[in-house]
Image (cartoon, rainbow, N blue to C red):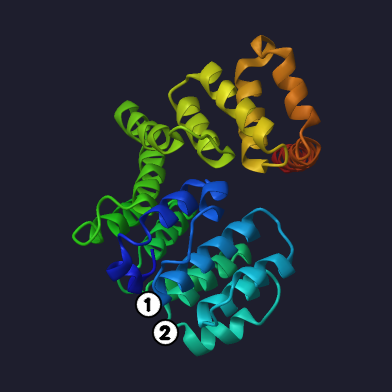
Amino acid sequence: MFSWEASLSNELYFVRQYFYSGSYDKLFEIDTSSLSEKGLELTELYMARAKLALGESIESIQGTLTQKSAGGAALLALAGEGNMDLLIEQYGDSDAAVQTLGAIYLIHRGAYDEALSLLQKSVENLEAVALETYIHLYQHKLEAAEAAITRCLDWADEEIVLQIAQSWAKLARGGLDSYNDAFYVYEELNGSESNPRVLTCMACSDLCLLRTQEALSSLRSALELQSNYAPAAANLKTAVLALGPLAPLDTKQLYENSSCGAFLTKQLDQKSQEFDALAKQFLANSSA
């Protein structure tokens, strides 16, 4: 939720719900004809971001953005059509969409501290809070992540993006109650129409709760809906390894046959080889 979206809270409620929960089909079905000018601009931006997440062409993304804005330019730059560094320089101090999308761009490049500095320029920008939480957790700074969430509870407590950020922190904090709290967030988001993102998040919570069979069921459903959804494939591999010989054969085959399963397996094999090489080097140094 961008900072200047507050006055459009009711108008954009379902837009935000569908986007952040990954229910992109529902998002694309929204009738935009009755939206205000600012509401239309933001809705188109969310729709364009959804298309980017789905891997649609730059032409399709451009066709969604009928309203010209710095945020739209930033979205196109994130898609590879424009200069994000220049947009951050021009609008990063004041434009919430550029701050958010620019931070995502910097995160993709591994420039986490730069992304954090950009996000901290935002005022009452919930997605900025979520991204700040993500960065702190990535850097293993749990207390900083929880503090970022706490600071915004005075002006927002029920927004979906904040609930998701809180669930990340709870999974990082650990403990039965925290794991259950995170699971219930995703279970509620799952609603009547499942999608790969929420199903995978439910599975992550189930894995933390040692409910591996339930996790397998959710991940199987996620990959059936989107065979190239890498987070689902990665977590399915975790579940299969956890079960060992008890893992169902069809689940192993589903992972191996998924479009990203071979890629993830190659990455794991590479990391295993690197570990073995480092272990040999360590042993050699220890015996010298």
Task: Tell me what residue is drawn at x 73 percent, y 69 percent.
Answer: 59
Residue that carries the numbered disc 2 in the rendered image: 93
In which quadrant is the C terminus drawn? Answer: top right
Label disc, if present, on residue 121 of the rendered structure: 1
- How many residues crowd around disc 1 within 10 Å: few (fewer than 14), some, or many (20 or more)? some
Q: Quadrant of residue 185?
A: top left
Furthest residue toward bottom = 90
Q: If you read the primary sequence from the N terminus, does the residue marked by circle 1 or circle 2 appear first?
A: 2
Residue 208 horizontal/vertical position (percent)? 46, 28
- Vertical side of 214 occupied by 61: above or below: below
Task: Tell me what residue is drawn at x 44 percent, y 51 percent.
Answer: 137
In which quadrant is the N terminus drawn? Answer: bottom left
Q: Are marks 1 and 2 in contact (CB under 8 Å)?
A: yes
Q: In whole angstroms, how far apart are the C-alphas of marks 1 and 2?
A: 6 Å
Task: Tell me what residue is drawn at x 61 percent, y 68 percent.
Answer: 64
Three-letter amino acid code at the position of disc 2 = Asp
Task: Tell me what residue is drawn at x 67 percent, y 42 percent.
Answer: 230
